[in-house]
Amino acid sequence: MRWRDRYGIRRLRGPRIARFDREATNDDIEALIEFAKSRRGVEFFVEPETFATDTTAVAVAHDGEWTRRRVGSPAVIRKVARDLALPVYDVQLTGYPARMRAYNERRRQAESGEHA
């Protein structure tokens, strides 16, 4: 069975020079969509591809909870964000939101048994 490119990952990706550890799939995009639909105040932050990793997007909810998935190209996540009427930012220009760092710190403290 051939892999269906439901979200335009291949079409919107453009020419590829490097091969990555794993390229984006429909499941990656669907995970971001599900995260966005099941939480309030979600914003997407596009991360550039590296030598080892395809372009990724981080979805961050209002409370700082987040998830990261491969998206293939910025155009793919921009289309998803447009379809969901959610904002999308270039993380190299905006950085990550403070609520994401606060969420990470709360999780770290909970896992280590620390109390604030």
Image (spheres, rainbow, N blue to C red):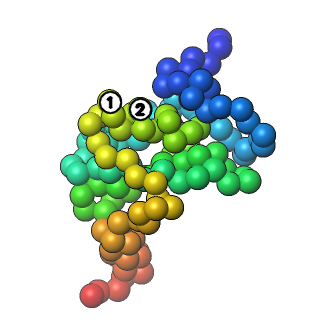
Q: Amino acid at mark 1?
A: Asp
Left or right: where 96 falls relative to 16: left
The residue singled out by tag 2 in the image is: 79
Please identify the residue farthest to the front as the structure is shown. Answer: 93
Q: Secondary structure at mark 1?
A: helix
Residue pictured at 42% horizontal, 80% vertical: 112
| Disc number for residue 83 | 1
Residue 71 in which image quadrant: top right
Q: Relative to 38, is 30 above or below?
A: above
Q: Is residue 95 visible?
A: yes
Q: Position of residue 91 (x, y in %)?
A: 47, 59
Q: Residues within 10 Å of mark 2 (few under 14, many from 20)?
A: some
Dot label at residue 57: none
Please state the horizontal and vertical placement of residue 51, each as a whole percent of the image.
74, 53
Image height of 2 relative to 83, above or below: above
Residue pictured at 51% horizontal, 46% vertical = 69
